[in-house]
Amino acid sequence: MSPAFGAMEVEHYAKGVLLEPFVHQVGGHSCVLRFNDKTICKPLIQREHQFYETLPTEMRKFTPQYEGVVSVSFEEDEDGNLCLIAYPLNGDHDNLESIDNSDCEPKNKLLRWSNKKTVLLENDKITKEWVRQHRKEEKMKSHKLEEEFDWLKKSEVLYYSVEKKGNVSSQFKHHNPWSMKCHQQQLRRMKENAKHRNQYSFFLNKSEFILLENLTSRYEVPCVLDLKMGTRQHGDDASEEKKANQIRKCQQSTSAVIGVRVCGMQVYQTGTGQLMFMNKYHGRKLSVQGFKEALYQFFHNGKYLRRELFEPVIKKLTELKSVLEKQESYRFYSSSLLIIYDGKELQEVTVDSDPEDLEDLSEESSDESAGAYAYKPTASTVDVRMIDFAHTTCKYYGEDSVVHEGQDTGYVFGLQNLIGIIKEIRDESSE
């Protein structure tokens, strides 16, 4: 890297925001990136963008807040290391400056994401010789790291032990295999697109990304369940091959039977000190009973069942069902539903404590090995949101060749069964 080029980088990146992998992505194939603590971004798909800009008012509480559009560029050095930077769209600096950037990466740093490992370079401190030596060391480790990543891609359910004394949330970035997979695939796609365009200059590629609310930001240790909703997944514009493929996936999973299947999951189990990840490939194999057991696992922290979450979840799902039953013509093909809660262990008080300490506490834990405890639920313990609208259609869009009438019966059917299964788990756990 020449001094002149380095100076250009410092000046250039100072005008943008460095993007990082979003470590709480558990499903989907589109890469999600962290813009700042409260905002994420993902590649702009015109139909999804249209959905957010024309979203019915009554649905807004069940979707992430839409925060605008940015231009994302990436640059490649001679070793194939990449960095992704978000810039105001078409020079519209007000678009970017209107968002709280106080927790973004320092703008005097360049974040390079390689296919092997993340390296943070401070342009004003690190010499060219140090960079070369560091890259040499990284290449020596690459074979082992690539083997590990291949293993991660083949594993459908993973458990990782974490350091309880440390920051559990920060350890997600080292372990979430799906986030890693999607991020590397996105880099490869952008790199290939640049090669086809023969653009080996400072800007190899530019893409538009939408900015959305980070739904996990309010939680210290987010536990996330990604559910693929509906009995049909292919959009009206799908090719015959794509249509047949999506129909097959539905028929071979719980989608066809109950209108919902597991697309991804991450759970922190305080009892074992483990992070558990489940991907969509495992979710497709589950029977209806297996789906129910996966839901049970999602609400279990390794010590006891988080029963205080059931009523808030059921209430939100029931409200969402009521809202969607009133939506005329909407079809949410291939969209997902997220259920999120905080996996951080709540304050515990032994049941023989002073009566004043037990006021407003929830019912006792059934964990026999740890003794009887009571737990005080926190505010906003759970969130339920719809995401991924790339194949959503509605007669109000105007340009679609197929126009649907009435409610999305497949999605509502999935919600109805989801509510019923959660109620079954609640009732069986209280017996």
Image (tube, helix red, strand yellow):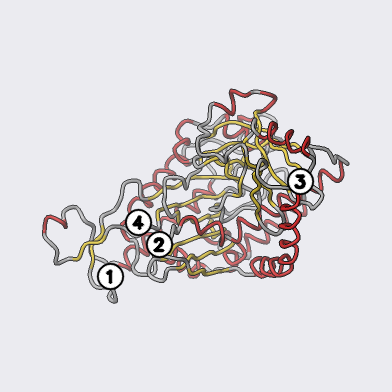
Residue 76 figure quarter = top right
Residue 32: image location, x then y, percent? 61, 47
Q: 370 above or below 236? A: below
- Mark 4: amino acid: Phe
Q: Is residue 258 shown left or right of residue 273?
A: right
Q: CA distance from mark 1 to mark 2?
A: 14 Å
Q: 331 above or below 414? A: above
Instruction: Quadrant for the N terminus, please.
Output: top right
Please report whichever mark, 3 or 1, sits nearer to the chain's N-terminal start: 3
Q: Secondary structure at mark 4?
A: helix
Q: CA distance from mark 2 to mark 3?
A: 38 Å
Q: State the residue at coordinates (74%, 58%).
A: 133
Q: CA distance from mark 3 to mark 1?
A: 50 Å
Residue that label 4 marks = 310
Residue that label 3 marks = 190
Please report whichever mark, 2 or 3, sits nearer to the chain's N-terminal start: 3
Q: Between residues 233 and 97, which one lies in front from this camera angle?
A: 97
Q: CA distance from mark 3 to mark 4?
A: 42 Å
Q: CA distance from mark 4 to mark 1?
A: 16 Å
Q: Secondary structure at mark 3?
A: helix
Residue that label 2 marks = 299
Mark 1 Cα shell of 10 Å, populated few (<14), some (14-19), many (≥20): some
Please report whichever mark, 1 or 2, sits nearer to the chain's N-terminal start: 2
Residue 287: image location, x then y, percent? 54, 69
Q: Between residues 364 and 357, which one lies in front from this camera angle?
A: 357
Q: Between residues 200 and 88, which one lies in front from this camera angle?
A: 200
